[in-house]
Amino acid sequence: MSKVICPWCLISDFVTDAFAGYGVPEKDAEICTDVLLESDKRGIESHGCNRFKPIYIDRIIAGIQNPVTEFEILKETPTTAVVDGHNGMGQVIGVKSMQMAIDKAKQYGMGMVAVRNSCHYGIAGYYATMATQQGCIGMTGTNARPSVAPTFGVDGMFGTNPFTIGIPTDEKFDFIFDCATSITQNGKIEYYERIGEDVHPGTIIGRDGNPIEGDSGAALKMIRHGQAALTTLGGIGEALGGYKGYGFAMAVELLSAVLQDGSYGKALNGKDENGKISPYHLGHFFIAIDADHFLGEDILRKKAGEILRSVRNSQKAPGCERIYTAGEKEYEIWKERENSGVPINDAVQKEIIAVRDELGLDYIFPWEDNYKPYSDSRKTVSHIENK
């Protein structure tokens, strides 16, 4: 499957205008675009343009995600807040909530915001990076549609539930540990289907307790229909520590529901009691810890950098050239793509063209025969009424 590099300015303007074309206010559309494309910049293509239409645009069209975000603060104290996102744009809810936690931390040392009734908020590392860039340790997590089985189980009972932490360093990149508590996630399986890659061994368990192998598209359908489930970090059973991934996943599930009286488990499957599609009602949490309320940001960054460098400089395994620390690979990909653009595969190219034509947007892309170099002048929506 071919990939075409699309310039950042072009794809950024297009995605923003497309969100706006489906009713997202312009400032909110810019936030959604920034979160979405930051994923591609870091090389996390499973959560970037690959999810632009099927996860966000299609849900807005279906009426299960609100393009205009109502950010309601249900309860607030100097260091905490509970927010209801009313099924608005998850990225907007995420950015506002993390900034609220950071602001509280800057004043009182620590801040936490718990969210209910949100939607998919993109890469969790975006929010942890918001904190590190402002001199804070940042943590966030989210529950998700149930697709992961507990240890010794085969039923998808909770989501891929990432637990993400960011710590400032004195290096060019901060420590950003962002991953699911399952071995893989739905977005990665969707991405494998798009590029024709098979399921990775041990990542999916069938109802018979055996691993699912082969075609990613078929495996994805099995997960969607409850015939299979993703496995937690450590894999099937306890031999390689699957119970540890299970425990971390449950901790995120709890923190994404218990403080905010939110939905959990099977209630997050996007279906109502009659089996019709409905909002996902996801929960998130955001925690910020301000370094200056301890011994200061400079000391934190220096010490964190020393620790990471000591690990990277330790003895390598035979045949291995480098030891990495979290955030390093993403930073290097970001630098590589900084002045180039985002790689877009055939399937996403077709989705982008469909959205453009539906909205009547004046864009021409690099994979089209009549493409010309994109100017910095912003293209605009030509008709967005009744969208």
Image (spheres, rainbow, N blue to C red):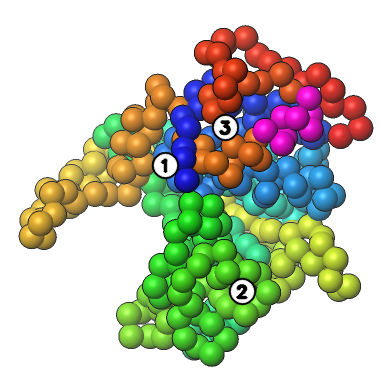
Find residue 12 and report its horizontal and vertical position in percent: 58, 26
Residue receiving disc 1: 43
Q: Residues within 10 Å of mark 3 (few under 14, many from 20)?
A: some
Find residue 136 and report its horizontal and vertical position in percent: 44, 40
As drawn, is 210 to the left or to the right of 304?
A: right
Q: Residues within 10 Å of mark 2 (few under 14, many from 20)?
A: some
Residue 358 lies within the magenta run: yes
Q: Is residue 358 depicted above or below 376 in this figure?
A: below
Q: Is residue 226 depicted above or below 141 in this figure?
A: below
Residue 34 bears which disc, if any? 3
**Residue at the limit of the structure toward the right, as seen here:** 386
Alpha carbon of mark 3 to alpha carbon of mark 2: how far?
Answer: 33 Å
* Visible residue check, residue 383: yes
Q: Residue at 48% of width from left, 77% of height from top?
A: 212
Label 3 SS? helix
Q: Is residue 105 depicted above or below 83 in this figure?
A: above
Alpha carbon of mark 1 to alpha carbon of mark 3: how far?
Answer: 14 Å
- Residue type highlighted by circle 2: Met
Label 2 SS? helix
Looking at marks 3 and 2 on the same chain, the residue that comes earlier in the sequence is marked by 3
Looking at marks 1 and 3 on the same chain, the residue that comes earlier in the sequence is marked by 3
- Residue type highlighted by circle 1: Gly
Looking at marks 2 and 1 on the same chain, the residue that comes earlier in the sequence is marked by 1
Q: Residue at 39% of width from left, 52% of height from top?
A: 177
Q: Is residue 83 depicted above or below 17 in this figure?
A: below
Residue 222 bears which disc, if any? 2
What segment is highlighted magenta in the picture?
353-360
Check if mark 3's residue and mark 2's residue have beta carbons within 8 Å. no
Residue 360 lies in what quarter of the image? top right
